[in-house]
Image (cartoon, rainbow, N blue to C red):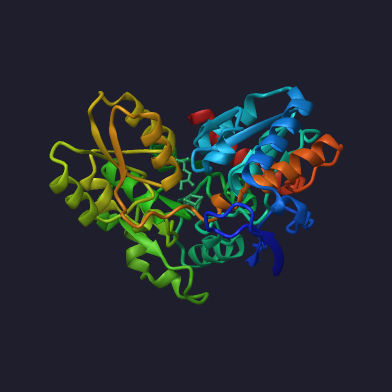
Amino acid sequence: MREQVLVPPDSACETDVGLMTVPLSQERAFPTWQRDIPREYFQLDAAALRERIAAARRTLGDRCVVLGHHYQREDIIQFADVRGDSLKLAQWAAAQPQAEDIVFCGVHFMAEAADILTPPHRAVILPNLAAGCSMADMAATRDVESAWEELVEAGIGGVVPVTYINSAASLKAFVGRHDGSVCTSTNAAKVLRWASERGERVFFFPDQHLGRNTAHAMGIPLDQMVVWDYTLPFGSLGGLTLEQLERARVILWKGYCSVHGRFTVEQVRQARARHPGVRVVVHPECELEVVQAADAYGSTELIARYVHEAPAGSVIGVGTEINLVSRLAHENPDKTVFCLDPVVCPCSTMYRIHPAYLAWVLEELVRGNAVNRIIVPEETAHWARVALERMLASA
Ligand code: 13P
Ligand code: SF4
């Protein structure tokens, strides 16, 4: 399904209106459409938007809380009551019994997880429903179900499914139904260990790099990991032989993040050549060779802590999304903090949370309307909750 929605262009101009066709995944929680944002919002300049967002927040008071992922742009993150990585934001949502509505400044799967973990009377709002995650979209639940069926037919047993939180609620539900768990970049090692103790092999969705990096750090040899190519037709066993699958301890789905796929070993080498003594920290969605060339790796929260805790005068090359890297550079003027990738690349879907959308959903909340509410259907939510709670219990 494709739908025309109004989104701001990815350029720096904050008042222009861009009209873009955005593919809407079949996997997403309903509604998969959004009401058109009134054009007046894109005619407001940055200062006017800031003022209207602040005014709506004052009126709403405790009735609404704004969560912001570390990759959100500056003109959004300044309004977040809580900022964090995927785990911190999911834990926060799960721990709040009060009845405020949540405006989630992040991407679709994060808002879905918050909806699943909070009571039904609490609205979770994603300011722009077109803010998805291209990696999550690489693991369509029907493709995963087909792959599972192929494994069963081939007699490959003892498979425990684990999905990265960057996945649709329906995939989390699949994993919950099949005795598996969700993980995030923070707790992937704990969850993978948990899964390895329960079966002969783990089927890891959708990010092959997080799966490989984590399994490799646990001591699982690379020749016991295989990649399932979901683009091949049913019956191809994901491009693998029966022998490869029988030997495998980890089956990695062939998904990846295009933002983190930009980081290379050559960039790390150049950073070290240009800045002797530089420390390099990267996200585990980067390729294994990049993670191995770095001094440290971990979630966005870990990267932020790593930079904040480094001694004054440190030089730090960072391999993650540019909004976070720029913020860390700004917040640490006593250190040199730079992005390893000279071609600065934001996560274009995170970037779709434009202040115009935030102003719109907050002003609608003031009028008593929850626009762009994420509601995961109860049957899906039930099983996805099972998989998320397994993760939260082991985190
Ligand atoms: P974190 O959980 O580390 O914040 O990662 C989320 C993400 O989408 C990274 O690309
Ligand atoms: Fe998805 Fe990559 Fe963006 Fe993270 S940075 S939200 S994995 S596309």
Number of numbered discs visible in the structure rendering = 0
Of residues 43 and 99, which is closer to you in this image? 43
Relative placement, left or right, of 340 versus 109 is: left
Q: In which quarter of the image is residue 331?
A: top left
Q: In this rendering, is residue 344 above or below 389?
A: below
Of residues 8 and 136, which is closer to you in this image? 8
Please indicate, yes or no, whether residue 23 appears anywhere in the rendered image.
yes
Residue 265: image location, x then y, percent: 22, 54
Q: In which quarter of the image is residue 256?
A: bottom left
Residue 175: image location, x then y, percent: 57, 49
Q: Which residue is drawn at 75% across and 24% down?
A: 61
Q: Residue at x 72, y 39 (%)?
A: 124
The quadrant the N terminus occupies is bottom right
Q: In this rendering, is residue 151 above or below 183?
A: below
Of residues 376 and 215, which is closer to you in this image? 376
Q: In this rendering, is residue 188 above or below 139?
A: above
Q: Which residue is drawn at 29% across and 49% down?
A: 340
Q: Which residue is drawn at 71% across and 23% down?
A: 97
Relative placement, left or right, of 157 versus 274 is: right
Residue 235: image location, x then y, percent: 49, 75
Of residues 250 and 45, which is closer to you in this image? 45
